[in-house]
Structure formats: structure tokens, C-alpha cells
Amino acid sequence: MITLRLIKPCDIQVITCWPGYRGGYAQMDYALRENGWLEEFSRKPGTWCYLAEANQESIGFSILSTTGHKEAELRIAVHPARIGQGVGKEIMSATMKLGFSQLEFDLVHLIVRKNNFPAIGLYKKLGFNTLGECTQIVQGRLIEFFEMNIRKREFQNQTSRGDE
């Protein structure tokens, strides 16, 4: 079982030293590094950065950042050694529960690289809907993304059926 807690500055330093992502995930390694997601978002107002832990070990992190009235963007990263072990689903579920219940968001949205098939599958399984596509510049390269979202009610319906 995982637990989430707010990230501390010392956690960010540890995360930037995690081993690099390999294979198809290498394209997302920048998110873990200095000037990555945590440094970008940890100072942003209306943002909550969470460390995911299991057995007192850091296994990933998630970010909820307010983008509108009762609306937030979600980002997630899993420790490179824990890829493929199902912890991404646990981190996502725990983060969305927090966002919808404690932070009182009504909508959570995200973007996912079009070639990140495992993440796309996970998000769909959790009940996210594909809204469209966008292109962004990431580290000087043009990257294509799918835009996805889930409403509080959809998430609650999903979890009450045990699909979580």
C-alpha cells in the first residue's frame, strides 16, 4: 500500500538523483531532474506536490496544480526501478482521491505523450476521457500529446464499481 505526503525540499534533491529512465521512458527523464517538474511546480501557487511511499521507500511522486475554478492538472512520475509494478495506478488513484475529496476539485486533466502507450492505457482504465490532441515544445523538441480528463463523479462511479 502506498501513502502520499507533501514533498519537502530534501525529497526533491533525492528524486533528482534517482537513476535514469530507460528504453521508451528515457524521453521523460527530464521530469525527474534539476529544473524538472518538481522545481517548476513546487513554487507555483495552488499546487500540491506529493511523495508516494511504500514501506518507507520513495516510489514516485504526483502533482496537482490548479488551472481553473475547481480544476487541476495532474502529473505523475514513478521511480525508474518501480516501472511496470502497478505503482503508477496506486499513485494516480490516491492522488485523485485527495484532489476530489480534500482539495475539492471537480475536474482533473492531464496530457500524455502519444507514444506512451502504458500510461494511456492506465488513464483510460482509471476512467479518463480523451478530449483531443495538442503539441508542446519540451526541451526544444515538438512533442505530440493527447489531452485527457476525468470528472469527480466519473471517478467516484469508477471506484464504487471497483474498477480502480
Image: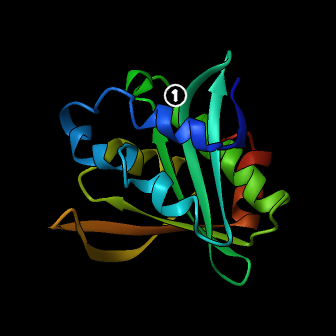
Colour basis: rainbow
Left or right of 30 on screen, residue 154 = right
Q: In the orientation shown, which residue stands out farthest toward the bottom?
A: 69
Please name the residue shown 39% across and 43% down the image. 32
Q: Position of residue 115 (x, y in %)?
A: 23, 52
Q: Position of residue 8 (x, y in %)?
A: 65, 42
The residue drawn where x is 40% and y is 28% is 83
Image-based side of 89 in relation to 113, left or right: right
- Quick one: 65 or 117, which is closer to the camera? 65
Reading the image, the residue beneath label 1 is 86
* Residue 78 x/y as whole percent: 46, 35
Q: Residue furthest top?
A: 55
Q: Quadrant of residue 56?
A: top right
Q: Quadrant of residue 143?
A: bottom left
Label 1 crowd (10 A; few <14 / some 14-19 / many >=20):
few
* Residue positioned 26% across, 73% down in the render: 136
Tag 1 secondary structure: loop
Residue 20 to residue 111: above or below: above
Kindly identify the residue that appears in the image at 38 percent across and 30 percent down: 17
